[in-house]
Amino acid sequence: MATRPTALSEFVASLFVSVGPSLFRYLARATGSFGITDDIIQDAFLALNRELYLGKRIKNPSAYAFAVARTKSASTLARNVSGAKCVPETLK
């Protein structure tokens, strides 16, 4: 049995549609990897949804999503020992 989307989930989904593409471009340049970018964006919007669900008042949800994504991308790149971008292998 499917459940109806709540106003909160509809809000986060609409924010994803409006902010997601620019966030994707920003992170793809920062990480050099579409896969890592997808993971970071998913984590950022899940974090936003969780905070709103818990009742946290976020004045600028778009900026919050960008801030979470920036932090996650920085920690991802910091784990990269060589300091190079996380570039996927090219197909030969």
Image: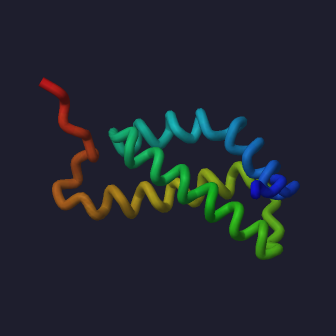
Considering every residue shown, the one lying at the far right of the view is: 7
Foreground pick, 84 / 89: 89
Q: Is residue 19 above or below residue 11?
A: above
Closest to the observer: 13 or 18?
13
Instruction: For the N terminus, give its image quadrant.
Output: bottom right
Q: Which image quarter holds the C terminus? A: top left
Above or below for 45 versus 79: above
Q: Position of residue 13 (x, y in %)?
A: 73, 46
Residue 73 pos. (x, y %)? 43, 55
Q: Which quadrant of the view contains residue 59?
A: bottom right
What is the x, y in percent for residue 25? 50, 34
Hey, which quadrant is residue 74 in on the image? bottom left
Left or right: where 13 falls relative to 4:
left
Estimate the x, y position of residue 84 in percent, counting from the top left.
Answer: 22, 47
In the visual, does 48 lie left or right of 56? Answer: left
Q: Residue at x 17, y 27 (%)?
A: 91
Relative to 76, is 9 on the left or the right?
right
Position of residue 90 relative to residue 24, above or below, is: above
- The structure residue drawn at horizontal position 28% and vertical position 63%, both measured from the top left corner, is 79
Residue drawn at (36%, 45%), measured in percent from left and top?
31
